[in-house]
Image: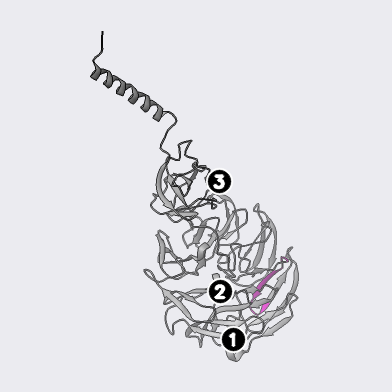
Amino acid sequence: MKIPRQKLQFLIILLLTIIFTISCKKDRLNPLDPKNPNSNVGILPPPDVTVSLDFRTVILSWDLIPNAVSYRVFRDDENIVTVDTNCFENKTVEVNKQYKYQVNSVHESGLGGHLSTPVYAVPKDLIWEFNDAGNSYSSPAIGDNDDVYVCGNGYLYALSQNGKEQWNYYIDDYIGVTPVISDDNTTIYILNKDYLYALSAGGSLKWKQELSCSYRRYLSIANDGMIYIPLYDTLVALNTDGTLMWKCTLPGIYSKSTSIGAEGTIFVNPRSYSRIYALNPDGTIKWLSNPAELSGIISNAFAIDDEEILYFISWLDYTSPALISVDGNTGNIRWTFNLGSGSYINEEPNIVIGANGTIYTTSSYGLCSITKSGTLRWKVRYGGYVYGTPVVGQNGTIYVTGGGYLYAINPDSTLNWSYHGLKGEDRNQPPVIANGKIYIQTNIGLYAIQAYGELENASWPCFQHDAKHSGRK
């Protein structure tokens, strides 16, 4: 039977269409699809995508890839953004939800390579809280092994990085002093009004030394492990085994704290006597400041910058709080910056120093940023008063508390984020940053809140210099 010509043409076209369709489907996926095995145009994916967390933010970073003009970021298999840098901050996330992230490199032709190995992140704000650490106006100390040491209700508590209690040791009914950790993480020092206690990392008593000082003295530890403690008008130096090395009488200063410079000089805070003492490591006096240049109460510990310049707050004439800068090599005053005559200020504000020597403290103005030459950069206050000592984190973010809030403030004074959930009073407990968390103690308990990175790599980024509270440059 003869097939009509028109029908034959139709069958031929249909057959060719089927053949063409099959050949197109075979191993031919969208060349822009990173899951297409043939999409690789000789450009590699980022080999090591790293993920870190800030407050309700996932931060991705990776190495630059040769010949890549941009990078596609995939979240849960969906391309959410294309960037021309090797980092991305994903702020549109839900708390406590797990996300999968991958990145691929894009060639100038517009074709992309394979996807990177997946990384996962769970954004959080409050990570954990420990409610037994109440009734204490102190700050937690964090060891290199991520252990957390905090005082509360008469005890020293050792917590794991997830907030679980490992052990506790009873000291007395009220401990108002911050624990200090030795450089090798083997000893935790805690001071009460009668004794200095040295505890092992496992919670056993190594030794205790009777001192008879008073509450809220702050010790410091030198590079060689020597321990310095101010006792009214005397500075005591102890060996690592608790034996007395030397003591030096400093008439009338009623000191509460010491700070140690880069060369080992010990600077003694003269709380009620307007004369700063600088001592050598052997206890001999290096210099005395001129008492005529200072008056009032020096209410906080010294912060020390990279040029051995001291910064502290003094109540000039007992009425006006001022930030003072003193040359640590000579004792000469460099400049004075008034923080608000007759206005409210935290009883014991502390100074911290960020990148480029920028100084931060709190006053009735709120958080103040002051240059190393003594001029105001900015002052800002979000919500009510900010009472506490600030702390400077990675990328220069400044954290400060007040009125139940934790504020994360950018170096240009803009608000990055805030967390409202701190219970109890948080006026004098300086926060600490370690292991991607910011630790804040109130008189109710200890909070661990998500923060990006570590302490800022600066000369004095937090109270007592570091997370171990060595008090040493």
Give the alpha-carbon distance from disc 3 to disc 1, as whole Å: 53 Å
The answer to whether 424 appears left or right of 150 in the picture is: left
Colour scheme in use: one colour
Q: Position of residue 168 (x, y in %)?
A: 59, 54
In the image, 235 versus 194, the foreground residue is 235
Residue 227, magenta (yes or no): yes
Instruction: Name the residue beneath numbered marker 1.
Output: 333
Q: The disc labelled 1 sits on which kind of residue?
A: Ile
Residue at left offset 57%, top offset 66%? 177
Q: The disc labelled 2 sits on which kind of residue?
A: Gly
Name the element at disc 3: loop
Instruction: Name the residue beneath numbered marker 2.
Output: 357
In the image, 107 versus 53, the foreground residue is 107
Viewer-nearest of discs 3 and 1: 3
Categorize mark 2 by other alpha carbons within 10 Å: few (<14), some (14-19), many (20+). many
In which quadrant is the C terminus drawn?
Answer: bottom right
Instruction: Name the residue beneath numbered marker 3.
Output: 47
Give the alpha-carbon distance from disc 3 to disc 2, as whole Å: 36 Å
Residue 70, magenta (yes or no): no
Q: Would residue 429 be visible to someone looking at this image?
A: no
Q: Which residues are magenta?
A: 224-234
